[in-house]
Amino acid sequence: MIQTEDFKTIIDQYKVIFFDAFGVIKNYKGLVPGMDETFAYLKATQKEYYIVTNDASRSPLQLAASFKKLGLKMITPERIISSGMLAKEYLDLKVNDGIVAYLGTSNSAHYIDNSGLHTLPVSAIDESNIDQVNALVFLDDEGFDWFRDLNKTVNILRRRNIPTIVANTDYAYPLNMHDVNIAIGGIASMIHQIVGKRFINFGKPDSLMFTFAYDQVRKSNPTITKKEILMIGDTLQTDILGGNKFGLDTMLVLSGNTLATDAETRITSTGIVPTYICEKAVIG
């Protein structure tokens, strides 16, 4: 069994904490036990904290409401930094008109709806409007017919030379203790292999995600440095790799994707080494 360290002792060394959401704060059972005490401690010690998540399935307002429903009222919308925000920023800057087609739910389309563009699910694209499609966004693994709409996505991208944005780069997410579901990043990777076009990836481990989060922190505290920020996550290939590449100290927790029984093997095989390893992001 891999050796773990004391969570409280570690976070006491930092001024700002970045948390991944699923597998760190919550899992398929609900809130990770003891998480309310963690956030109460952060508030008592006046530490800043942000949820840095690849979840583009819902808006920050909806994500905050889901945490509140679980009992975490301190996670407010302004403390949530989602990869969907980067997709919106890109569309605002680069796509001026036409249709933005998307794969995902209507909730996930919140980000691109707010860009003032005409947004449509891939299912609504046909011969009458395909020539008006000026961007395509992968948002969520639900909300569409996998057989019909994935095939349609391939053919839209074969016909249209347009920016293609992957708002969530996760390949899979835990469904329960033993099983995973394919995430939208996995779907995008498959379609990328088929159409052979370069996609624009947002979300961890991409450095743009961490740059965006760092900029948000520095708006309220311009003097903060990377050495004063800790990234906490449960997945080596996204949370830990992304934090390491951006120059942050990282903590791997064993409450989600990475289990205590195989953590050492995964670290050795990937070469992705966290600064710290803790059982959970929980005080005590």
Image (spheres, grey):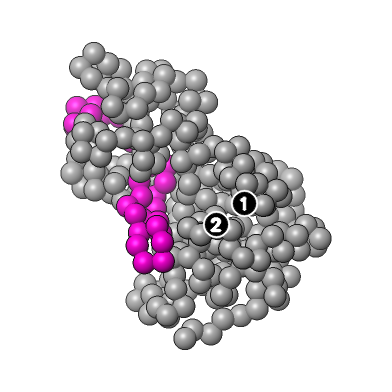
- The C terminus sits in image quarter: bottom right
Q: Is residue 105 left or right of residue 277?
A: left
In the image, is 183 to the left or to the right of 248?
left
Residue 48 in the image, given as x and y percentages of width and height? 72, 55
The magenta stretch spans residue 189: no
**In the rendering, which numbered label is found on residue 30?**
2
Give the image location of residue 120, x and y in percent.
36, 23
Q: Secondary structure at mark 1?
A: helix
Query: Mark 2, residues whose alpha carbon is within 10 Å: few (<14), some, or many (≥20)?
Result: few
Q: Residue at x 23, y 43 (%)?
A: 191
Give the extent of the magenta segment: 155-184
Left or right: residue 32 compared with residue 16:
left
* Precedes in sequence: disc 1 or disc 2: 2
- Please, is residue 156 above or below residue 28 in the view? above
Query: What residue sits 42% from the left and 42% below the top?
Result: 167
Disc 2 marks which amino acid?
A: Gly
Q: Residue at x 47, y 49 (%)?
A: 54
Residue type indicated by callout 1: Leu
**Proximity of marks 1 and 2: CB atoms separated by less than 8 Å:** yes
Residue 266 in the image, given as x and y percentages of width and height: 38, 75
Q: Residue at x 18, y 44 (%)?
A: 194
Q: Which of the two residues, 104 or 52, is positioned nearer the viewer here?
A: 104
Residue 59, quarter of picture = top right
Residue 58 seen? yes
Say which quarter of the image contains residue 268: bottom left
Judged from this view, the residue extending furthest toward the top is 128
Residue 244 shows up from this direction: no
Residue 70: image tag: 1
Residue 181 vertical position relative to residue 157 in the rendered view, above or below: below
Residue 49 found in image quarter: bottom right
